[in-house]
Amino acid sequence: MGIGSWAGLWFALGIPLILMMYLLKRKFIDTPVPSHLLWRRVLENTEANRPWQKLRNRLLMWLQILAAALLAFALMRPFLWADAGTGGTLVVVADVSASMSAVSALEPNNSEASAETRLDELKREVLADTRQADGALTLIRMGETPQVVASAADDRAAWNRAVEELETDYARTSYREAISLASAVAEGQQDARIIVYTDGQWSERVDDLPVSVPVEVRRIGGENYRNASIEQFGTEGTRAVGVVANTGNSALEVEVELSGDGRAQGNETLTLQPGERRTVTFDQAEAAEVYRLSLTGQSDDYAADDDAFAFPETGGTVKVLLLSDGNLFLEKALRLSGAEVSRLDLSGNVPTADGDSEASETEKDTGTTASKTPPLPEEQPDIVVVEGELPAALQSGAWGERIGNAALWKIGGEEASRQPGNRRIELNAHPVTRYLSLSEPYFGPLTEGKPAGLQTLASIGGSPAIAAGTENGQRTLWFGFNLQSGDLPLNSEFPVLVSNATSWLSGGRGGGLGRAISGAAVEVPIATGAESALWRPLQGAAFEINNGAAQAVSENQTSDSSGDTGLASSQIAPSIPGLYAFEQSGNGLDDAPVYLLDVRADASESAAPTAENPVFAGAGASGEPDDGLQSATAGDHRSRLPLTIPLAALIVVIMLTEWGVYRRGRSI
């Protein structure tokens, strides 16, 4: 026998209340009165009854006590274990969340660690429970997206394959959707019941979900849970900082190891009590492109949260050299795009990092700034923006080499120009024109003679206005108009245009994409001309499980408002935690940037399982609300026979008997 809810035991307090009623019951004595003069004394004696008296053997009292006890017992939802039936529809809900990859609890007599995971134990228990079943079997995979793996299966070989092929899902698990799906599948089926196989490590409430059929919970894994988790990790300069937590229910000793580009750089040993968090700091970390913080030493049960990676969130700041007589709007827009701008006045002033140009006193006095070649910038710029004509002194020598090694953005010029026939603008699909309409601003006269080999991105009145392409192996952007001649810099789309241009000219600047949960959407800058891409595992569980095999991205072609089609910028993160590189390829795309992504399992799966099982607010086998159904242990191949209805019928019989006793009075 088992109890469904011990909360009903509170109703047993009604029993002592019934006893108190009989203890305090007033007792009247028949007294013969010979004269009316003695009435006053008799009345005083009658009203002065003692409040406490000896309990007498009364049938009415025992019936009331029995009814109260049975009512309290019925509210506890007792049941009897019976051999599970083999008929009817059985819906199996298999929990494949990240925590199911944890090592299953060991038996007390085991001295060595077991390699069996909770998911392995789940498969074994499901196959054992359904081996003799002759009814319809349905298997629901409870992961990121609930999935009916096998529907009303009667082929036992196919059923066994479906169970054996279950794999861990490290994404955020949809517990509520899975239970709702199971209830919908089972509803209306003959003798249907649901069995949920889970470790009880749920991050969502399900007690408000109506379930119309009996639900059983088979608990996987033991009570002992050992796990240490890296909750946070980051670097700044030569300093690396991480936060390590003990999310299990037993003390752990772990070794925290820092490595950079695969080379060990330091370690620290920690002893953590359950629930304890510690910050570890490595102050002298060597420079590296990718840092890894790992937990080694005493192994824990759950390995998916034992690694974390850190790297620059971007591929570094884009360095822009602006050659201009002065354009505040353009310079501010470049800075808003995240670029580091150095401006060089075309009259010969020296470029400065903060955009202020200064000429030496000698140059000002002699007036030689226009003819003298300015000094080279200290660092090679990524993009050179030329507003107007490029001076001849900067087209050769060291300056010519610096500019030739950078992407070039040429704006306007002194060539012959003409006013377009109309202001109608036509845009072609390109990353520079993405998210833009440019239908409102006035661009002014257009420069004649678009450079050969460049693709027209925008035309006004049929004349090229914006073009892009490659010259001398470097990306080149051409604006056939002067910004000062129109009101484009005053338009709200101008900062977006400048940001698009900077991103495209810099080639996307491969680098870090940060962290993402398995299966989550990630925004990735897509290179122009990219036709396909893949996630290549570099380190961590992803590399060990896949042996370095790349995972192709989904074929999610997209189309923006301008009609551009290609790889979508929103990609789905890989399904297994680890460090990945996003690699793009396409016709003529030899230098596409590579982006790194740290994929993590859902953090809620690291916590220790609760002692209580998931609660379902549905109808049990008795048809009464069942909001606290307890679970059967794994390996217990029995079903429940609720006693609520028989107890309710017995209470009704007792109450009818009590009414009969009351009507007959004290004669019974």
Image (cartoon, helix red, strand yellow):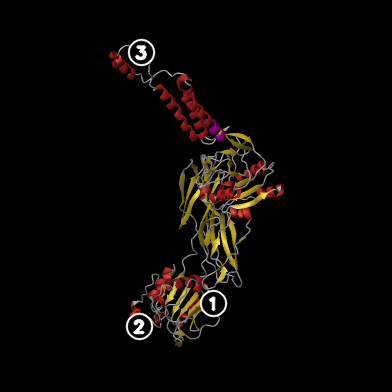
Looking at marks 1 and 2 on the same chain, the residue that comes earlier in the sequence is marked by 2
Residue position for label 1: 469
Residue 95 position within the rendered picture, expressed as x and y whole percent measured from the top left: 58, 47
- Helix, strand or loop at label 2? It is loop
Q: Which residue is mark 3?
A: 32
Of residues 394 and 554, the one nearer the viewer is: 554
Residue 368 visible = yes
Say which of 644 and 496 sits in front: 644
Q: CA distance from mark 3 to mark 1?
A: 125 Å
Residue at left offset 40%, top offset 83%? 371
Q: Position of residue 557 (x, y in %)?
A: 58, 67
- 169 left or right of 377 in image: right
Q: Which residues are magenta?
A: 643-650
Nearest to the observer: residue 184 or residue 530: 184
Local crowd size for mark 1, using a 10 Å CA cut-off: few (<14), some (14–19), many (≥20): some
Q: Which circle marks residue 367 in the picture?
A: 2
User: Element type at marker 3?
Assistant: loop
Of marks 3 and 1, which one's residue comes earlier in the chain?
3
